[in-house]
Image (cartoon, helix red, strand yellow):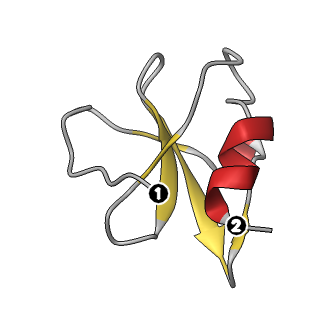
Amino acid sequence: MTLQDLLDILACSACKGGLTPLKDESGLLCPACGLKFPIREGIPVMLLDEAERVADRSIPQGGP
């Protein structure tokens, strides 16, 4: 399964918005609510307790 396959089925745990991968592959950003979900050992951690609020939503993002 590729990252794009995951992005097609994953949604933000808080607002159900779409997710965008960060360029450094450290997490997935929800531009709608500003939460960043970490990626650990190649697996997105979609728990709200593990997410962090990103004050600047213009942080570098990447595409698939």
Q: Name the N-terminal-most of marks 1 and 2.
A: 2
Q: Tell me the quarter of the picture where residue 7 sits.
A: top right
- The residue drawn where x is 55% and y is 36% is 19
Query: Which residue lies under the disc numbered 2?
Result: 2
Looking at the picture, how far across and down is residue 35, in whole percent? 50, 34
Looking at the picture, how far across and down is residue 27, in whole percent? 50, 59
Question: Residue placed farthest to the bottom in the image?
Answer: 41
Taking 32 as reference, is 24 left or right? left
Mark count: 2
Q: Amino acid at mark 2?
A: Thr
Helix, strand or loop at label 1? It is loop
Q: Along the line of sight, which residue is nearer the eye, 55 or 39?
A: 39
Marks 1/2: CA distance? 9 Å
Helix, strand or loop at label 2? It is loop
Looking at the picture, how far across and down is residue 20, in whole percent? 47, 42
Query: Which residue lies under the disc numbered 1?
Result: 64
Label 2: how many residues lie within 10 Å, few (<14), some (14-19) or many (20+)?
few
Taking 64 as reference, is 11 left or right? right
Specify the quadrant that holds the N terminus.
bottom right
Residue 33: mark = none
Q: Is residue 28 above or below residue 34?
A: below
Label 1: how many residues lie within 10 Å, few (<14), some (14-19) or many (20+)?
few
Looking at the picture, how far across and down is residue 24, in whole percent? 34, 72
Q: Is residue 53 above or below residue 28?
A: above
- The residue drawn where x is 78% and y is 46% is 47
Q: Along the line of sight, which residue is nearer the eye, 8 or 14?
A: 8
Q: Amino acid at mark 1?
A: Pro
Q: Along the line of sight, which residue is nearer the eye, 11 or 54?
A: 11
Q: Is residue 23 above or below residue 35?
A: below
Q: Are marks 1 and 2 in contact (CB under 8 Å)?
A: yes
